[in-house]
Image (cartoon, rainbow, N blue to C red):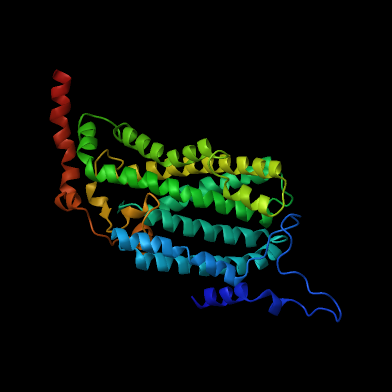
Amino acid sequence: MAAAAVAAAAVWAPAALLAAPAAPGASPSPSRPDSGGRSGLLDLSPLDVALCVLLVAVQVLASWSLGLGLHRQLAVAACRCVLQLSLLGVLLKPIFALGADRWWVVACYGAFMVCVAALEAAGRPAHGYRGLFRDVALAVGGSSVLTILYAALVILRLRPVWSPGYVIPIFGMILGNTVTGVSVGLNAALEELASGGDRVERLLALGASRREATRALVGRAVRAAMTPTINGMNVVGLVSIPGMMSGQILGGSDAGTAARYQMMVFFLIGAAGCASAAASVHMAAAAVVDGGARYRADRLVARRGAGRKAGGGGSGRKGGGFGAWARGWLPGGGRRTAAAAATTDGRGAGQEEHRRPLLAGDARG
């Protein structure tokens, strides 16, 4: 928190205090350049951003009038937004400077981004299991790294490949959108495994393999994860101007070039999101239905308040944060679901005996 405060002070320091003193007789530079020339971005002062923060009052008013109880969460979210972006603005300067000649600087920062993204995605579903964070980190990190390498080597042909000015912003956009898809897919899959495990058990009892018993729910979960990206591609350019294109246009880039960069980013996000969602959902299904084709409801852990975040709404953190990491990586911990509490380990062990007469009767029929 102290580091974020120092970063905020550095970012919000008035430009007049940081600039070198003007030469005697020189005319002062205008604080607001003419925007018609489009030579660069207009400078936003701390006062300008404070005027933007006042718009949070609209959300607070809606929360109060509808009885949503989101007043505290909105305040915390606004403060975190300011502090985290201020810290990012300070950190990226030395990272860009050092990373131009040192690939490991970009790699370390990329690994940090993957860990934060995996922690956020693993903390959103309403149910979890031991090893969830590990699985999400592998799925998100693997798909995102392969995607950014394809972009750097094949599409952009960067020299050096790790050019931080390109790799870090694009990698961040890929990870940010991947988190949403993975959390939606995992929430759908784990919710169905927790509430509809009897259907999976029936298929297993009839001789279906683990893949066959979970194929339908995995497909539904991956479909739900991919839907936001597909919807975004359908309306882009008609309803909204995406963030990267808007940023390049505001920075003075040609609109055609900005449009082509945005196309690239959309396709990169779609590929990484699909791969990471499919991998994470498959690993979640494999964790709940083990290699012996036994449905293990005892491995599911219910989380209070986490499910509201899976679709991108709400900010309740119970079940997320460090607790999600501890339950997702370290052994032990967690509160089992009601169905899992009624399910003992003997249920899985006795499932083979239950399956044999069903299979024998099915064979006789």
Quadrant position of residue 208: top left
Q: Position of residue 321 (x, y in %)?
A: 38, 63
Quarter of the C terminus within the rendering: top left
Q: Position of residue 179 (x, y in %)?
A: 46, 51
Quadrant position of residue 323: bottom left
Q: Is residue 128 above or below residue 95?
A: above
Q: Position of residue 134 (x, y in %)?
A: 42, 54
User: Horizontally, is 299 left or right of 141 in the view?
Assistant: left
Q: Name the foreground residue: 120 vs 10.
A: 10
Query: Which residue is outermost to the right?
Result: 25
Q: Name the foreground residue: 67 vs 322.
A: 67
Q: Is residue 5 above or below residue 60?
A: below
Q: Which residue shows up at 62% across the image and 41% down it? A: 264
- The answer to whether residue 351 shows anywhere in this view is yes
Q: Is residue 169 above or below residue 81?
A: above
- The answer to whether residue 320 shows anywhere in this view is no
